[in-house]
Image (cartoon, helix red, strand yellow):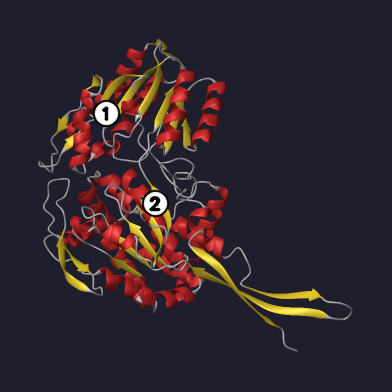
Amino acid sequence: MTQELYERHRETLEQALAAIESREYWSAYSESPKAYDHEAAKAAFDSYVSGEFPLDQPGADGTVEAAPSPYGVSLGTRYQRSSVEALVEAAGAAKAGWRDAGPKARAGVCLEILQRLNERSGELALAVMHTTGQPFVMALQAGGPHAQDRGLEAVAYAYAEMSRHASKARWEKPAGRDNVVALDKTYHVVPRGLGLLIGCTTFPTWNGYPGLFASLATGNPVIVKPHHACVLPLALTVQVAREVLAEAGYDSNVVTLAVGRSEDRLSTTLATRPEVKVIDFTGSTANGEWLEENARQAQVYTEKAGVNSVVIDSTDSFSGMCRNLALSLSLYSGQMCTTPQNLLVPRDGIETDESHKSFEEVAQGIAGAIGKLLGDPERAVEITGAIVNEGVLEVAESAASLGEVVLEARSLEHPQFPDAVVRTPVLVRLEAVDEEVYGREHFGPVAFLVATGSTDESFEIFRRTGLEHGAITAAVYSTSEDVLAATERAAMDVGVALSCNLTGGVFVNQSAAFSDFHATGANPAANACLTDAAFVAGRFRIVQSRRPVTA
């Protein structure tokens, strides 16, 4: 069955392998809403509301009820609670069989899991929407096909690294006249051990699938621990994975779900278990640093908070720049690790295709573009989504006290979900000396227009905040090739991905699987690039055996 799965998906894997080499556009899964059965998805989603999620695992010990949706809907889904001991023991028992399956068989199983997840993308969309607050189309695309592409990308990198060397070799060394020493050597891909995926509240599948599938493809069983407020998307993922594993003849406990109450502290308990050898985490800087410092027995991959900057020097499309930044700042209410926060603008203004613009005119241009974009509340909520939790709401509501407000935040009423908490972005003017404010992340619909002495000072601020506090994205607007080259050098110094002069349908927030390297591991926001060979290579080792060749 497992070789059959490999052959079934071999063409897809080969295309993925070619894509990670060429870095050209390629996607395995359609992002069009029309590609998915939304009636069936709604029926499946409704069956989970106020019911027990169907997942049979070892060590059952009661249930845990889901948190309410950010859209104000009471979900009431109950999830089976399993003991940590039972989950760790079950994963340990499943480890040898999954390791011995080999790279091809594991790749086939992983690709079958991804294919079945893709078929349930409509269901995943509703699960992501009602646990994260993402608007529906974003939840469908980012939570479904885009996340699945990222999982496939991880499988491709894992397969490439595991297949880089021969699995067997005849080693023959001349040893004097008419004499040869000959050995048969075998090279085994050996996984590190038990993997732990710690999910986040905003992009549980998009951020979670790279680590999950990198670990599975390299032979590590995985315990999936969702954030207690965002369980359903990863529960669905585990359900599908266990189904495919069982059908393929493997122990379904290669993948399990760990659900608990917030006071159970499951993440820290699991993370320090000696059996856990690989950890994938997306979330706050404090929690990420705790894992890096305390889970010493494991290879820890973290994506934490960052301070994303935009250097605005000049532009040949002022209206295009303002529109592009307006959507970047508004999308999902700024609840993305890739959303820009600090817009660095010379105090004396910038040159544009509409003549010189003062700092105030630049600020009003961006504020006006946001106002136009979000002027129709019915349309606006499909861009902003809902605020995911009280912490983000507190950040948004306190921003007005931090400086001169250029654009006030507005509360919007969602036409479908009247209890949803929706906020438009707030823009605050600061001076370059106000680094105690803009020098830390303000997660949510908050952006700062920072008045600098010059573009050179903007570079200094960009470098300093990125190196000290980390960054996931950066952007620049300039008509000068010298400035663009200088910004690229600064981005290399910081270790952050750079976007230049985006004025059309591509935004700094976006990261394309198979082409863009998401995060770099070169600044404090992340200790690894989540889409490269190094991300998978640390999850396995090569163990060899050798024996003399008999006559």
In this picture, residue 541 sits left or right of residue 441: right
Query: Secondary structure beneath disc 1?
Result: helix
- Mark carried by residue 133: none
Residue designated by label 2:
293
At horizontal 49% and vertical 58% (from top left) the residue drawn is 536
In terms of secondary structure, where does tag 2 sit?
helix
Question: Which amino acid does the dot numbered 1 rest on?
Answer: Leu
> Marks 1 and 2: CB-CB under 8 Å?
no
Question: Which tag is nearer the camera, tag 1 or tag 2?
Answer: 2
Rendering coords of residue 389 (x, y %) = 19, 43
Residue 404, above or below 466: above
Residue 3 showing in the rendered view: no
* Identity, as a three-letter code, of the amino acid under mark 2: Glu
Residue labelled with disc 1 = 373
Q: What is the quadrant of residue 526 in the picture?
A: top left
The residue closer to the viewer here, 452 or 479, is 452
Residue situated in front as seen by the camera: 29 or 161? 161
Residue 432, image x and y in percent? 37, 19
| Total tally of numbered discs in the picture | 2
Residue extending furthest right? 177
